[in-house]
C-alpha cells in the first residue's frame, strides 16, 4: 500500500500543479483524509466540535474520512467518526504515538492528506506538525515555526513589535519570577499598564484562563488563575474597543476575508459564551468604512506572513473607539471550525461555502507539500 506522499508523487508526474489551482479532484478514487481531533489540551472538547463540523461538510462523494481520536492522555485510536458516542471514544484499544504501519496489531493510519483539527497545546503549537513533518506527509495548516509562534501570544507580540506592527501594550511574566517577586511584578505591571487589564495564559486559546481585571485588588487572583494553564502569562492593557476578526486563506499569496465583529454578551468573549451559552452577537460582515476594512484585511495578511503561516489562520483585532486605532491582538493558526465559528462564517459571507473552503484547504496542503518535495528533490 502506498504512503500518502508516494500516492501524491505517483500522480503529480502527470500534470503541473499551477499555483492556487491543484487538480487532485480529477482522480477517480476517493481522496482519503485523516481527521485528527481531541488532544491533550484544555480545548479537547472544542476540537471534537470542530471535527464534527468538518466531517459534516466534507464532500463524501469526493473524500473518504478516517477519523482519528486522541484522548486527553495523548493516546490514539480510529473511531467511526467525530460523532462517535462517548462510550466508543473511551473504550480501548488505544495506541501511543502515531502507528503509521501495522505493528503488533496496531491499525494503519495512512492517508492522502492529514487534517489536524487540534486546538491549543499539543496540536496547534507545532507539536503535531513536527510529527507530520517527520512522517513526510501532507497536512492542512501552518508548519512548525508558524504554529509555535502563533500559539505563544508573548512571542507573537514580540515578533510583531519588532516589525512595527500595532499591538496592545503588554507585560510578560514567568511563573518562577512571580513566585519569587510577587510584589515587584505587581509594581511593574501597574507602572507600565493602566487598568483595566486582561490577564491570559501565553499558550492557550478559546478564552481559557482569561480574566479582565479592573483594579489592583483582583490582579494577583487573575494571575494565579492564568498560571494554572501555563508557566508564562501575558498581561495586556484593556482597550475600549470593538473586537474584529478576519480570516486568512492561502500560502505564498494569502487573501483575507471580509472582517466580522464580535459583540460580547459579557465584558469580553469568554469560554462560557463561546461554547456553552451562545449569547454573544456577531456582525458578519462588520459595517466599517471601506478604508478601515482594507486596513484590517491588509494587517491580517501582514501578520500571517510575518510568522510564515500557511493554509489558514484567523487574526483578531481591537478597533479603539476613541481613536480608530487598529491593534492586532492575536493569530489562531487552527481556529475553531464549529458551525458558529467565525473562520468558516467569514468565508461564507465572502463567497466561499464551508465545503468549498475545506476543498481549498486540502488543495493548499497538497500545494505546500508538493513545493517542499520539489525544493528538496531539486538539490
Image: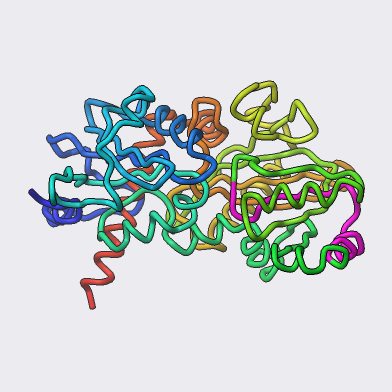
**Relative to 244, does residue 152 appear above or below in the rendering?**
below
Residue 57, horizontal then vertical, whole percent: 37, 27
Residue nearer the viewer, 131 or 346: 131
Q: Is residue 224 left or right of residue 89?
A: right
Q: Residue at x 24, y 44 (%)?
A: 23
Instruction: Based on the picture, tell me whether residue 190 belongs to the magenta stretch.
Output: yes
**Residue drawn where x is 56% and y is 33% of the image:** 346
Q: In terms of image quadrants, where is residue 170? A: bottom right
- Can I make out residue 154 in this image? yes
**In terms of depth relative to the viewer, which is nearer, 225 or 79?**
225
Quadrant hosting residue 234: bottom right
Image: magenta residue range: 185-204
Badge count: 0
Give how far across and how far down residue 137 sits, in percent. 26, 55
Q: Residue at x 43, y 29 (%)?
A: 354
User: Position of 222 compared to 160: left or right?
Assistant: right
Q: Residue furthest left?
A: 1
Q: Is 350 on the left-hand or right-hand side of 362?
A: right
Locate residue 155: give its quadrant: bottom right
Q: How is the image coloured?
A: rainbow
Query: x, y (%) of residue 274?
Result: 63, 30
Which quadrant of the rendered structure holds the C terminus? bottom left
Residue 174 horizontal/vertical position (percent): 70, 65
Q: Residue at x 28, y 41 (%)?
A: 94
For this rendering, which residue is in front, 262 or 94? 94
Amino acid at each position: 500500500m502506498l504512503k500518502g506522499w508516494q500516492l501524491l508523487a505517483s500522480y503529480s508526474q502527470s500534470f503541473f500543479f499551477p499555483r492556487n489551482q491543484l487538480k487532485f479532484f480529477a482522480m477517480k478514487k476517493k481522496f482519503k483524509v485523516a481527521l485528527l481531533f481531541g488532544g491533550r489540551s484544555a480545548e479537547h472538547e472544542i476540537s471534537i466540535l470542530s471535527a464534527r463540523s468538518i466531517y459534516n461538510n466534507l464532500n463524501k462523494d469526493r473524500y473518504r474520512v478516517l477519523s482519528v481520536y486522541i484522548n486527553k492522555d495523548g493516546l490514539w485510536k480510529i473511531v467511526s467518526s467525530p460523532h462517535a458516542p462517548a462510550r466508543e471514544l473511551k473504550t480501548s484499544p488505544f495506541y501511543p504515538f502515531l502507528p503509521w504501519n501495522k505493528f503488533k496489531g496496531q491499525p494503519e493510519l495512512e492517508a492522502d492528506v492529514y487534517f489536524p483539527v487540534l486546538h491549543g497545546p499539543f496540536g496547534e503549537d507545532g507539536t503535531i506538525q513536527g510529527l507530520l513533518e517527520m512522517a513526510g506527509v501532507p497536512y492542512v495548516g501552518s508548519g512548525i515555526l508558524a504554529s509555535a509562534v502563533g500559539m505563544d501570544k508573548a512571542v507573537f507580540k514580540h515578533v510583531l513589535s519588532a516589525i512595527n506592527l500595532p499591538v496592545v501594550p503588554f507585560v510578560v511574566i514567568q511563573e518562577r519570577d512571580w513566585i519569587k517577586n510577587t510584589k515587584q511584578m505587581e509594581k511593574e505591571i501597574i507602572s507600565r499598564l493602566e487598568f483595566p487589564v486582561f490577564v491570559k495564559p501565553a499558550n492557550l486559546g478559546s478564552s481559557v484562563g482569561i480574566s479582565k481585571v479592573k483594579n489592583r485588588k483582583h490582579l494577583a487572583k487573575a494571575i494565579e488563575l492564568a498560571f494554572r494553564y501555563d508557566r508564562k502569562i501575558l498581561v495586556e492593557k484593556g482597550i475600549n474597543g470593538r473586537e474584529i476578526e478576519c480570516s486568512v486563506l492561502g500560502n505564498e499569496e494569502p487573501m483575507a476575508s471580509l472582517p466580522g465583529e464580535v459583540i460580547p454578551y459579557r465584558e469580553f468573549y469568554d469560554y462560557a459564551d463561546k461554547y456553552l451559552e451562545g449569547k454573544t452577537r456577531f456582525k458578519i460582515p462588520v459595517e466599517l468604512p471601506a478604508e478601515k476594512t482594507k486596513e484590517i484585511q491588509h494587517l491580517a495578511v501582514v501578520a500571517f506572513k510575518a510568522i510564515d503561516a500557511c493554509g489558514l489562520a484567523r487574526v483578531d483585532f481591537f478597533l479603539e473607539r476613541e481613536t480608530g486605532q487598529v491593534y492586532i491582538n492575536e493569530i489562531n493558526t487552527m481556529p475553531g471550525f464549529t458551525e458558529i465559528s467565525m473562520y468558516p462564517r467569514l468565508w461564507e459571507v465572502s463567497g466561499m461555502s464551508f465545503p468549498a473552503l475545506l476543498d481549498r484547504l486540502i488543495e493548499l496542503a497538497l500545494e505546500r507539500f508538493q513545493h517542499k518535495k520539489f525544493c528538496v528533490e531539486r538539490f
